[in-house]
Amino acid sequence: MRIAFFVWEYPPVLVGGLGTYAENITRKLVDLDHDISVFTLNPGGLPVREIIEGVEVHRPMIANATKIFPLLVTEDLRRWGTNLKFFNDVFIYNILSAAKFVNELIRRDHYKFDLISVHDWLSSMAGLIIKEEFEKMPLAFHVHSTEWGRSGDTGSEVVSHLEKVTAESADGIVTVSNVMRQDLARHGWPENKIDVVWNGVDPERYDPDKVSKEEVQKLRDRYGIEADENFILFVGRLTWVKGVRNLIQSLPLVLNEFPKSKLVILGRGEEQRDLMALADRLGIREKVLYRFEFVPEGERILHYAASDVCVFPSLYEPFGIVSLEAMAMEKPVVVGARGIVGFVEQIISSGPEQNGIHINGHDPADIAWGIREVLRDRKRARRWGENGRRRILNYFTWEKAATQTLRVYERILNR
């Protein structure tokens, strides 16, 4: 197939899980002999067209229209305040990408595309424009999260409307977990259009046997974590849906039983100051260590290797790639399992194949219970980690994700 892939985040611009997904899935689709043209945001200074690992990448240059937007947009968007610049960038990226696709690639250069693939509301406008121009060109709408989920039902009406209209216009909808599929259906989305494809991880890259013990020791030394101390790791955006505040509140309960423990937090987000202030109020400042940035993959792998348990107490998480990364590195994981949380489909919490623990991410006491359960038996924790890697190899590789995605695309084409 020749596939047009619209995603606002793509290397070298990586913000979170969507960019990680886009990078890996497009390269794997190319490995499987398909032609992929990515249209993505250009923050400035990047080539407007290049080939990366066999993927054709287009990045139209954008412009700042924030002085004009308040004259045209709804009251809902005016309330975005300084974040209106973000909407501006997304809007203009969509308009210019759709125009380039329609006028240059199709009409001028006579590209023949089999399918358009758009990802979340961030690229939905481009999909809607192209569908208006070429009604018979199949449109696949990938839903990695929703505005109502991210915001706790208090988000932007404009974004929610874009999501709903794109779902109605799409020939097929692809989402990342069964719990997410059920949530979309509950909100009135056409269930007969929705397919589930789990995300993946590269077990060749995330391989504990390839990590230097000396580098692991250097990392623990950098954080001041002694050999007899427990290294608890969180990786992710520092926003309310990730449950980091509740994780910090759980730490005193963990320290009561395991005083030689430290929590390392990797990520950035609007809660950074609040999290530091919370740790200070709880009197555990020395027990919580921070790295407020999007940590490059190589360092992230090293952090997984150095940790004793990885904790992701999300309150809303349609899938969550970080848990796959931890599992591939043979680490036991403690994950949120209440509400719309796809971790429940990755982590087996009982039986001979157990690889972690399900907890209620809303409850600090339950989070603390899960962490303590892992720390109480190191031999059992190692077994859970080994089970996790086996589960990755069986179900969660990028090749499996790409193959299943292609099957969905073929069904869309056949319709």
Image: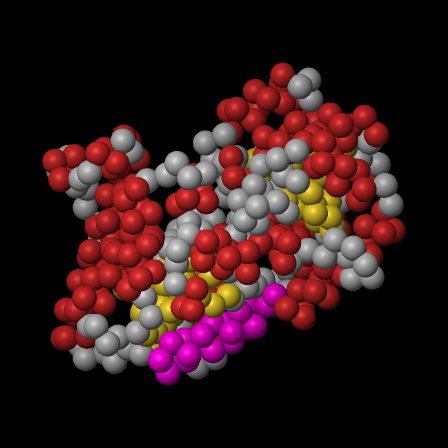
In the image, residue 415 sits, relative to residue 183, either above or below, namely: below
Q: Residue 324 placed where, x, y %? A: 62, 57
What stretch of residues is rendered in magenta?
Answer: 396-415
Q: Residue at x 66, y 22 (%)?
A: 285
Query: Total of numbered circles in the picture?
Result: 0
Q: Residue at x 72, y 57 (%)?
A: 348
Residue 412 belongs to the span the image colors magenta: yes
Q: Residue 267 placed where, x, y %? A: 53, 39
Residue 101 horizontal side relative to residue 175, left or right: left
- Is residue 327 among what the camera can see? yes
Q: Quadrant of residue 57?
A: bottom left
In the image, residue 112 sits, relative to residue 299, either above or below, namely: below
Q: Quadrant of residue 6?
A: bottom left
Residue 368 horizontal side relative to residue 58, left or right: right
Q: Residue 268 placed where, x, y %? A: 49, 37
In the image, residue 312 sits, relative to residue 414, either above or below, namely: above
Q: Residue at x 69, y 22 (%)?
A: 284
Q: Residue at x 25, y 56 (%)?
A: 125
- Is residue 38 among what the camera can see? no
* Quarter of the image with the N terminus in it: bottom left
Q: Out of 182 and 208, give the one closest to the viewer.
A: 182
Q: Residue 135 placed where, x, y %? A: 21, 72
Q: Out of 20 and 340, give the one closest to the viewer.
A: 340
Residue 404 horizontal side relative to residue 215, left or right: left
